[in-house]
Amino acid sequence: MRKHFIHSSVRSVVSFFLLLFMSLFLMTCSGGCGGGSNAVNDGMSGAPDTSGLIVKGPGHSLADGEVILTEAGDYDVSGVLSDGCLVIDTSSQEVNVNLSGVTIANSSGPAIFAKSASLVRLILSEGTVNAVSDGGADADRDAAIFSSVPLEIGGGGSLVAVGNCQEGIASDSTLTISGGDIRVSAVDDGLNAGEGIVIDGGYLYVDAIGDGIDSNANLTINGGTVIAMGGPDNGGLDAGDGFRLLINGGLVIGTGDNNARADESSAQKVLSLNFGAAQPSGTTIHIADKQGAALVTYKTGRDCRGFIFSSPSLQSGVAYNVYTGGTSDGTERDGLYDTEASYTGGSKETYSSQSGGEEEDFILSGTVGEFNIGDTFGSGGGGPGGGPRPRF
């Protein structure tokens, strides 16, 4: 009996030290291999460590504060990375990344970097809040979310992207927004893509010091709600030289000093106002039909000289009234009021017609109507159907 007890005790001691060694080894890898306290969890041990990310998927690795997704397939990522980067690097394969409550900040580069893949989809999981921000002065990867490959963002959750270096969300290739509640702020462009931007749906709010949405190729809006504000000498909506701004659906508002002109081949009507004097931040712009039914009531979030508006309710051949100033008592989000809200106290605007007279009925004769309000633009162009708009 004593002999058996001794053997059992020896086995217990050995087992204890073996478990202790394994625990210390795992703690060292999770803390040290990932760069300090930015741990990565394989998702099998329950709740996330608030100092790291939970990654569920085919394969990932750690290197110098980077969490690298290394294989194609579907991933689920949640948790906090306090100073590091989520990198997608899978050669020429598709990757779907479900962001399920992620907070990532990086003091020296992008929070999310799509480095190598045939396509990266960032899917905002339903009901989750996700936040990313960048830092440093990385001239090559200069956005909170930066992609070298085609990038698509969608889903039913929300995303806040803060671009402290340059852009909020940027792609060297294409960028597609297919859904989600997305809010972007940036010290330069809010969204920027080298080979085109497509917005198919979702809610997109952009507040940028540069252009709100800047495509170096075509900018195509097919649906959703888009509110994009650009800074001084920039536009809310900007397409590349020789390319087109196409608005085919959705509710669209763009403010700034230098919005692109929507292309006549757009499937949805577009109304563009060019003010001779800057409209201060907080100015209400109200557009209604002759019976008083509101198409849009919007309170500007930045000083602007240009206002571009499109919605399914806008029609050609219908006379509209435009007002500035005044107040609305309705429900408002990001400056956009419910169209059922009452509006009072504004000044009714007129524009300079192509014949040099002053007109007060704003009527689109085609797909796109541009109207010059004030003296800065002179008397040529800006009437129904619009003439060429001066660039600021």
Image (cartoon, rainbow, N blue to C red):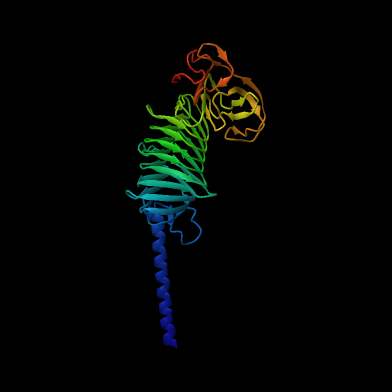
Please provide percent x and percent y for residue 291.
Answer: 65, 25
Residue 4 on image: x %, y %: 42, 85
- Of all residues, the one furthest to the bottom in this rendering is 1
Location of the N terminus (image quadrant) = bottom left
Residue found 51% across the figure and 11% down from its top: 355
Left or right relative to 120: residue 370: right
Q: Quadrant of residue 23?
A: bottom left
Q: Residue furthest top?
A: 356
Asked if residue 371 is positioned above or below residue 76 in the image, the reply reads above
Residue 385 visible within the image: yes
Which quadrant is the C terminus positioned in? top left
Tally of numbered tags: 0
Residue most toward the front? 317
Q: Residue 20: which quarter of the image?
A: bottom left
Q: Is residue 161 above or below residue 316?
A: below
Is residue 66 at all visible to an observer of this figure?
no
Q: Is residue 307 left or right of residue 342?
A: left
Q: Is residue 156 above or below residue 327?
A: below
Q: Nearer the viewer, residue 186 or 10?
A: 186
Give how far across and how far down residue 236 sits, in percent. Answer: 48, 29
Q: Please state which of residues 232 and 149 is positioned toward the viewer in this rendering.
A: 149
- x and y, in percent, of residue 26 in the image: 40, 62
Q: Is residue 122 above or below residue 375?
A: below
